[in-house]
Image (cartoon, helix red, strand yellow):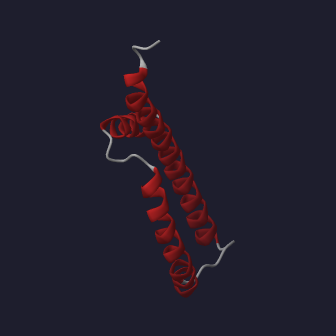
């Protein structure tokens, strides 16, 4: 098995990229479904959301998400070609 060690640095970022792509694609689908559900509930009057409520929640949550972005970017091998290929395949086929 001494001839296969060079594959590990290529395959691991590819698999990570593939998994991240699938997770992103499924998360975006779920977000679209939730937004559509909220729109239907607001249109029927079952739910009332004001712009000020949305603004206050966004200003509270978005800085926390931005802080987590730096942590995630430091973990992912996003400069690797294998990761980018895996990410593209995960987004396309996932």
Residue 10 in the image, given as x and y percentages of width and height: 37, 30
Image location of residue 80, percent across then percent down: 33, 41
Towards the viewer: 24 or 85: 85
Q: Is residue 80 left or right of residue 66?
A: left
* In the depicted structure, whether residue 38 falls above or below residue 45: above
Q: Residue at x 55, y 62 (%)?
A: 35
Residue 65 position in % (x across, y down): 51, 69
Residue found at the far right of this picture: 46
User: To which quarter of the image does residue 61 belong?
Assistant: bottom right
Q: Residue at x 37, y 24 (%)?
A: 6
Residue positioned most to the bottom: 52
Residue 17, given in percent of the width and then of the height, sits at 43, 39
Q: Quadrant of residue 36?
A: bottom right
Q: Is residue 39 visible?
A: yes
Residue drawn at x 42%, y 28% is 11
The front one of 52 and 76 is: 76
Q: Nearer the viewer, residue 37 or 31?
A: 31
Up/down of 82 relative to 56, above or below: above
Q: Is residue 93 visible?
A: no
Residue at the outermost front position: 2
Q: How many marks?
A: 0
């Amino acid at each position: 098995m001494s001839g296969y060690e060079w594959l590990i640095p290529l395959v691991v970022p590819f698999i990570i990229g593939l998994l991240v792509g699938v997770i992103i694609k499924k998360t975006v689908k779920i977000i679209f479904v939730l937004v559509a559900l909220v729109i239907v509930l607001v249109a029927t009057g079952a739910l009332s959301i004001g712009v000020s409520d949305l603004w206050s929640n966004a200003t509270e949550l978005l800085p926390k998400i931005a802080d987590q972005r730096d942590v995630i970017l430091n973990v992912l091998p996003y400069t690797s070609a294998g990761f980018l290929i895996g990410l593209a395949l995960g987004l396309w086929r996932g």
